[in-house]
Image: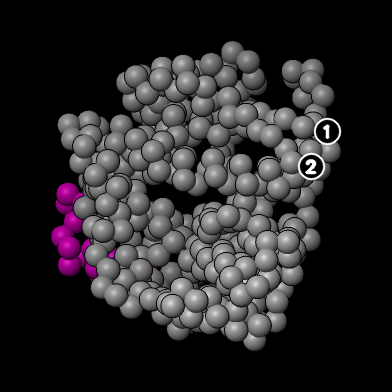
Amino acid sequence: AQFLGTQHHEKSLDLDAGRALIPSLLARLDEPLGDPSLLPAHLLSAFAKEKVTVALSGDGGDELFAGYDPFVALRPAALYYATMPRASHRAIRRLADLLPVSQTNMSLDFRIRRALMGLSHGPELWLPVWMAPLDPKDTAALFDAPLRIEEVYDEAIGSWEQAAGKSPVDRALEFFTRFYLQDDILMKSDRAAMMCSLETRAVFLDNDLVEFCRKLPHRFKYHRGQRKYLLKKVARTLLPEAIVDRKKKGFGIPLAKWLRQFPEAPPLAPISGVRTEFARRAFAEHRSGRADHRLFLWSWLTTQAFVRRQSFSVSGGGPDVSPVVIASMPAEQNRHNTQEWARTNME
């Protein structure tokens, strides 16, 4: 703000206080959303709404200019995959499982386990598996019916194969733009802002700019290990080096820590075809510190909130009931409504 001579407003967000908003936030979603940065995005939107009614967002910058960690991981991943025998890989995964489990966002042990999880499969599955809330074998264990990984990630595999002949970076750009940006980032930003009646405009997603970026060779996006290469070249003409070169910081929350503070697994409404016991065991392992299931548990909680909302509506609660009431219903009432919803759908 001093360098540019602009007027900025600053606020330190109390995430522990914000944690109390999670049940109501999840209950107000139209569909499950497995991205926990919904909470800080909502807190930021509420603060912005105090000053403005329309805000600009940077959504799309990482997807169009290769800003994420997986872009850096592609080359070493290819070398590892080409040279590491499968038996040795399995042994390395077992060793990685012995690493102490950290509560820190994007900790070293978290990244190592994620990387190895993806490298258990072919290159066409690296990106969707790296971004997934569960290891594919655990995803199969979650459901009653047989589940093939090729079916779960059919669209991502198709996108990778359709780009045959293109570089891994180009294929990754396509993956993040077609799937992650559209089905996660934009949905999250829209819900977080509209809950505060704040409108957002994603300036990077101007049609002409997107078309220009997609035609650019990938060396202008990821160049010699530098992400957002062209974007940073432009930024250097406008901003101090310290800002342009500062370490990338995600919009995370202490989710792993919060989930460990659950005294016991929250009430789990039954979902047809899904093994509730799997989720109960995941909660127990996470609370004990034996494993880090933060992404799955958040996805499970947001799905539970959606199921409860649907069941409450079908069983007579109606759309006029506050989402906060739905999220805080006693467990026995939740179970009754879910059973009633299941019976109605079966009939």
Residue 306 seen in this snapshot: yes
Which residue lies at the image location 40% right of the left edge and 43% below the top edge? 179
| Between 193 and 230, the one nearer to me in the picture | 193
Q: Is residue 295 above or below residue 76?
A: below
Residue 271 is situated, as x and y percent measured from the top left of the image, at: 47, 75
Which residue lies at the image location 43% right of the left edge and 69% below the top edge? 99
User: What secondary structure do most residues of the magenta stretch adopt?
Assistant: helix
Horizontal side of 198 relative to 129 (left or right) equals right
Which quarter of the rendering shows the C terminus? bottom left
Specify whether residue 84 is painted magenta.
Answer: yes
Residue 150 is situated, as x and y percent measured from the top left of the image, at: 23, 57
Residue 94 seen in this snapshot: no
Res. 8 mark = none
Q: Is residue 131 above or below residue 223?
A: below
Which quarter of the rendering shows the N terminus? top right
Residue 85 is situated, as x and y percent measured from the top left of the image, at: 15, 60
Label 1: element kind: loop
Contact, mark 2 vs mark 1 (Cβ under 8 Å): yes
Res. 47 mark = 2
Q: Which residue is mark 1?
A: 51
Q: Which quadrant of the figure has residue 258? A: bottom right
Which residue lies at the image location 58% right of the left edge and 55% below the top edge? 30
Residue type for callout 2: Phe
Residue 194 is situated, as x and y percent measured from the top left of the image, at: 68, 43
* Protein image colouring: one colour
Q: Which residues are magenta?
A: 80-96
Label 2: element kind: helix
Q: Is residue 39 above or below residue 7?
A: below
Give me the C-alpha separation between circle 2 and circle 1: 7 Å
Which residue lies at the image location 59% right of the left edge and 13% below the top edge? 237
Specify whether residue 196 is painted magenta.
Answer: no
